Amino acid sequence: MSALFGLSLIGAFCLLGMAVRRWIPAFRTNMVPAFVIAGFLGAIAMNVGLSGVLEGVDSDLFAQLTAVLFTLSFISIGLTPPPASTKTDGGKTQKVLLRGAWAMGLTWTFVFAVQALVGVAVVATTGRFGGMDTIYGFMIPFAFAQGPGQAVTFAGIFEQQGWENAVDVGLAFASAGFAAALLVGIPLAKWGMSRGLATHSMGISDSVSKGYFRQDEETESMGTETTFSGNIDTLTVHAAMMGAAYVLAHGLAWVFSHLPGFIGDTISGMMFMNGLLAAYFIRWVMRKLQVEHLLDRQMQAKITGVTTDYVVVASFMAVQAAVVAAWLVPILAAVVLVVVVTVALVFFLGQRYGSDHDFERTMGMFGTLTGTTPTGLALVRILDPRMRTTTMAEMGLMNLPEMLYIPAMLTISAAFAGEVGVLGAVGIMAALTAAYFVIMLITRCFGKRTWTLGGTGDQPEEEEERSTLESAVE
């Protein structure tokens, strides 16, 4: 019953967020999403006494909801069929997608490691203000580069290993990162539009500004029915597949829990990854049975959107202000410096990806490295609302090279488990950071600048890539 109340409260605050954005011009002008407004309002309400009104509705409940909803969002991503366009063009589109996805995935991995080093350095310097242990700085990349869901997942593992308040710290970092993704990212995106860096951007319509469409406006379909509703509803089939994947994910977690030491604890606790693997397996089985068409791509994408919106609001409502206030100085210092470093690195690399949509890629990376992948996609939608570039598809595929972050993740997990000291973990992370950068150099992930801060820069030298991009979006 408490979970139902929690979900209901999240929905109520989402509706309130829609109303606030509709009637406050500043939110419309800066295109602040309603679910972010809802999260801030929910966090305020929870910390001024709402948690004491309803029995069982407290920060722990919303932390649990964050973890579960995040797992469901990854399951939904895994169940989403690929776009039909990737199967055509004689391989040209695939070439562009793979090249962009590889460069962006390695960028994400490299910045993940840098964020960890910056976080530890800042907390080591400022942690004496409130007695915050240096090791908590390692939690920043989980919150920034991976988002609130994974911040809660890993923080929950760390709390089981004896690190108190890890969930609250992770949620505080994640909430601040999400705010930075939009409060910094949206002005940067609009600045790029004014400089002509986004060649496929459009003017911001009244409906986009308000955040909802008029009754007479033509909009995209939410999906296609794949089953006869008199037998079973299409949405029921999608929900059932997600439920099956969720059960299978717990089975995988049980299997992984038998791995020795902290590795078993860590991997079994990564329910989002177990969910993704389970979803991939179910989709593979459906393909073999020739029933994959029962999963509609557009409808599944909308389910992912619902879970993502709810994850963000739940993560904000799970933050306990009292815990954050005690360590406010190191938390704020780490957040500010990590945001600055992330902007600098993403812009430096993003100018050199070598395509005609590098600014779109840059903003997608910034949104992902401070919020979540959907946040990055939201920034790309501002710049490329008609999806004329391949940026969004590239961001979907970049999850594969991102798996190179696993050694960095295991290093941080080993530090929290006491298997490696903080200084030893810092040394390993520094070596991994250098290794990631070398891989980017070897695989030619970046080169000559394609845009500058003052406006458009040199265009890509390879005519083949230009023609490929044109064919990809026709």
Image: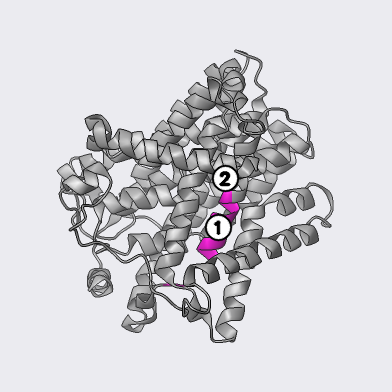
The residue identified by callout 2 is 149
- Disc 2 crowd rating (10 Å Cα; few below 14, some 14-19, many 20+) is many
215 vs 46, left or right, is: left
Give the structural element (helix, strand or loop) at label 1: helix
Residue 149, placed above or below residue 103: above
Rendering coords of residue 290 (x, y %): 54, 86
Residues at circles 1 and 2 in contact by the CB criterion of under 8 Å: yes
Could you tell me which quadrant the N terminus lies in? top right
Of 157 and 56, nearer the camera is 56
| Badge number at residue 107 | none
* Residue displayed at 62% across by 49% down: 68
Residue 133, placed above or below residue 75: above
* Residue displayed at 16% across by 43% down: 195
Q: How many marks?
A: 2
Of 394 and 169, nearer the camera is 169
Mark 2 residue type: Gly
| Badge number at residue 74 | 1
Q: Quadrant of residue 322?
A: top right
Q: Does any portion of residue 17 appear in the rendered image?
A: yes
Rendering coords of residue 109 (x, y %): 52, 50
| Residue bounds of the magenta highlight | 69-82
Of 212 and 266, nearer the camera is 212
Rendering coords of residue 376 (x, y %): 39, 49
Separation (CA) of disc 1 from disc 2: 10 Å
